[in-house]
């Protein structure tokens, strides 16, 4: 599943993120439903069986539709499917990210209320279909290919290829190095070390290398994972006494892509194991590709011998793109997603969203979704409005208390939970999001945020990076974070 994000349903219908869920689902076969009202007994509410789920779902949809009569609403809501129901949750599937954004922005509260009325209080979980399909309106979004699996680690995102990577002065050198490595892995630059700020295309570029290598030779065994995932794999292998298998898994690959190596900071055991993996692969002339937010010498708490090895090959940086490159990226992305973006609007967006490419893409997706829902063309005024409500004018120094309060409200937690040692997902993930927001909105240092949460700075770093990664794919989480940021914004006109 692409992204599983849950919202806890409360009596008052407020929205609480609980993050990826790993409960066992009661999967419901998809079926087309016509809308009609139906009477539901109390017994059905508390224990829906598969025979009446269809009827319950139709009832939920009918209740939402009664309040939204426009044709567009019908079109959007019709495309939702009931995927699973458990005593605690209702999982609703949207066919693609645009539909999810629309439902999240316009219908979520109504949907929650209808579910509560029809099925009793349950978490409502919105999810994008495993394989994104269809379009918001016919002809709008091209079908997406499936993710390409690799020998070890995460499948390659089909969107991250050289073909979709726009080259400009800011990333030209890194792109050329990546191309060279993709042509002759192991021969040129080993390791290839790409560094740059958040959302500037590092993951995109290294994924593109992996794609290109597999295009040339599908038998190549590729490990593609973040330093974080490497650590988790190591920990679970240690715990289950499976170290031999772990070593074998990583040492038999032809190409190792390790994303965000700064996450190795302070993890001594992981660094040690990675050191041996590195050496083994290097000696066999297997290609190693690393990314980081900093150059090796600036990564804190990194062992000298690793730092040293990271500098053996080629180090290439990615800088923030200039305005021309930002326009080109927007136009390419609009073309790929079939979003009708006038060039004047592309320029306007590029001039106003400067921080990173991910943010730029986020605004474009939102703009495309809102425009197609309303049926309005995308204009500069419209873009200004979307930017106003999603990116700009964040209060530069939001307070820690305000961030904690906003998180607690949305996620249904108490401030003490955030400082507690509790590790269950529904506490740990909001805590990570809170740390991420402190970094973004307070501009506080990692150690300072660590003190506020009673954690060390590497935990904060991990939280920030993990949240950034989740934000990339998880449209619903993007919506939550955007709405918190909006709450912490200066009042209009100031
Ligand atoms: P990083 O790993 O550096 O944080 P990502 O690789 O995840 O950044 O990039 C963030 C988003 O921006 C991705 O969706 C990516 O496709 C897009 N992006 C970044 N740079 C470019 C570029 N030069 N051309 C096209 N898309 C880009
Ligand atoms: Mg990345």
Image (tube, grey):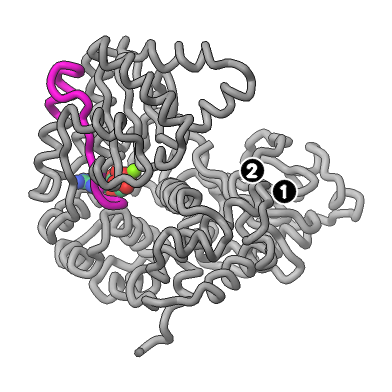
First of labels 1, 2 by sequence position: 2
Residue 304, horizontal then vertical, whole percent: 30, 34
- 290 or 349: which is nearer to us? 290
Q: Is residue 339 left or right of residue 440?
A: left
Residue denoted by label 2: 21
CB at disc 1 and ligand 1 closer than 8 Å: no
Asked whether residue 196 is drawn in magenta, I would say yes
1 vs 2, front mark: 2
* 290 up-or-down from 432: above or below: above
Residue denoted by label 1: 89
Res 99 seen here: no
Residue 165, horizontal then vertical, whole percent: 20, 41
On the image, which quarter does residue 411 sit in?
bottom right
* 456 up-or-down from 483: above or below: above
Residue occupying the point 30% across, 42% down: 292
Residue 399, horizontal then vertical, whole percent: 49, 76
State the quadrant of the C terminus.
Answer: bottom left
Callout 1: few (<14), some (14-19), or many (20+) C-alpha neighbours within 10 Å?
many
- 277 or 428: which is nearer to us? 277
* 452 up-or-down from 423: above or below: below
Query: Residues in magenta?
Result: 179-201
Residue 456, horizontal then vertical, whole percent: 51, 53
Q: Is residue 276 left or right of residue 351?
A: right
- 203 or 230: which is nearer to us? 230
Asked whether residue 72 is drawn in magenta, I would say no
Residue occupying the point 73% across, 43% down: 85
Q: Are dots 1 and 2 in contact, CB under 8 Å?
A: yes
């Amino acid at each position: 599943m692409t992204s599983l994000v849950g919202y806890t349903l409360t009596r008052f219908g407020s929205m609480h993120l609980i993050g990826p869920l790993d409960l066992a689902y009661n999967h419901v076969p998809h079926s087309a439903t016509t809308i009609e009202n139906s009477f539901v007994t109390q017994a059905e509410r508390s224990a829906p069986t598969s025979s009446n789920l269809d009827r319950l779902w139709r009832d939920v949809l009918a209740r939402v539709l009664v309040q939204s009569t426009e044709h567009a609403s019908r079109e959007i809501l019709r495309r939702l499917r009931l995927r699973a129901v458990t005593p605690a949750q209702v999982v609703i599937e949207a066919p693609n990210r645009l539909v999810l954004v629309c439902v999240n922005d316009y219908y979520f509260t109504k949907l929650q209320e209808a579910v509560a009325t029809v099925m009793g209080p349950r978490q409502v979980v919105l999810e994008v279909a495993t394989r994104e399909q269809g379009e918001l309106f016919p002809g709008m979004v091209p079908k997406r290919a499936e993710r390409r699996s690799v020998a070890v680690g995460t499948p390659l995102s089909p969107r991250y290829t050289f073909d979709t990577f726009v080259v400009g002065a800011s990333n030209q050198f890194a792109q050329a190095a990546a191309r060279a490595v993709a042509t002759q892995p192991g021969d040129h630059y080993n390791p290839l070390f790409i560094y740059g700020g958040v959302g500037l295309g590092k993951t995109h570029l290294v994924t593109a290398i992996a794609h290109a290598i597999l295009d040339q030779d599908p038998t190549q065994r590729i490990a593609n994972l973040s330093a974080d995932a490497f650590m988790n794999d190591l920990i679970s292998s240690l715990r289950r006494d499976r170290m031999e298998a772990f070593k074998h898994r990583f040492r038999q690959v032809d190409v190792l892509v390790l994303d965000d190596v700064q996450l190795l900071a302070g993890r001594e055991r992981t660094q040690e194991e990675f050191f041996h993996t590195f050496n083994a692969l290097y000696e066999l002339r297997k290609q190693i590709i690393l990314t980081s937010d900093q150059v090796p010498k600036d990564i804190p708490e990194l062992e000298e011998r690793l730092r040293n090895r990271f500098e053996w090959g080629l180090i290439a940086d990615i800088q923030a793109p200039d305005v021309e490159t930002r326009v080109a990226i927007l136009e390419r992305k609009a073309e790929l997603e079939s979003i009708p973006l006038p060039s004047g609007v592309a320029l306007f967006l590029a001039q106003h969203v400067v921080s990173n490419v991910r943010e730029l893409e986020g605004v474009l997706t939102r703009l495309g979704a809102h425009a197609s829902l309303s049926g309005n063309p995308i204009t500069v005024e419209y873009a200004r409005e979307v930017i106003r409500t999603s990116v700009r004018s964040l209060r530069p120094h939001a307070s820690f208390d305000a961030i904690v309060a906003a998180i607690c409200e949305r996620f249904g937690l108490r401030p003490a939970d955030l400082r507690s040692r509790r590790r269950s997902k529904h506490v740990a993930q909001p805590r990570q999001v809170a740390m991420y927001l402190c970094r973004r909105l307070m501009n506080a240092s990692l150690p300072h945020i660590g003190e506020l949460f009673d954690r060390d700075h590497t935990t904060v770093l991990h939280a920030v990076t993990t949240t950034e990664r989740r934000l990339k794919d998880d449209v619903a989480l993007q919506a939550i974070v955007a709405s918190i940021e909006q709450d912490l914004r200066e009042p209009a006109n100031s």
